[in-house]
Amino acid sequence: MTTEGIEAVFLETHNWGKAAKFFQALGFELEFSTDHNSGRLRNGDGPYLFIAEVPQDREPRTQIVLKVPDAEAFHPDPTVEVVTPFEDTHYGTREMTVRDPDGRLWNLQAPAGN
């Protein structure tokens, strides 16, 4: 089994409100927001955008998340360096981290319970 393309883009920001308004002005619709300065937006049927506010002393990061339909059935090729195997998250998914040949980290996300 392989990945199924891009599931999401995780974006960190220093100002959740300004970031959300910026992407809404570009056509994204707010699907939900949390009470801790984060939320999910989507533009059409494409990958979702999850934005989370981080403290001013932390450099905001961007992470592309790849979709995996079934964590239990996913067995990466031996050429893929697994940094962390699939683990349950507090927000209802399972995530794995892998490293590409240039050292970048990639998150793979699967539904919980698979």
Image (cartoon, rainbow, N blue to C red):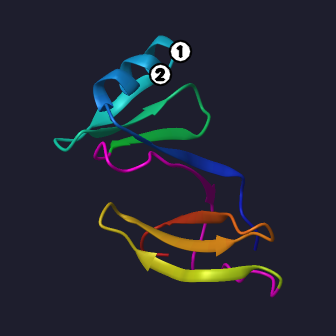
Please name the residue that numbered disc 2 is placed on: 23
Quarter assignment of residue 75? bottom right
Query: x%, y% of residue 28?
Result: 49, 22
Report if residue 72 is visible in the image. Answer: no
Residue drawn at point x = 67 percent, y = 78 percent: 74
Where disc 1 sits, the SS reads: loop
| For residue 114, above or below residue 9 | below
The residue tagged 1 is 26
Give coordinates of residue 71: x percent, y percent: 57, 76
Q: Nearer the viewer, residue 15 or 25?
A: 15
Q: Magenta stretch mostly in which secondary structure? A: loop
Contact (CB < 8 A) between labels 2 and 1? yes
Q: Which amino acid type is shown beneath numbered disc 2?
A: Phe
Give the residue at the far top of this rendering.
25
Quadrant occupied by the N terminus: bottom right
Q: Residue 83: say if magenta.
A: no
Highlighted magenta segment, given as a residue range: 54-78
Q: Position of residue 106 (x, y in %)?
A: 63, 63
Q: Residue at x 68, y 64 (%)?
A: 104
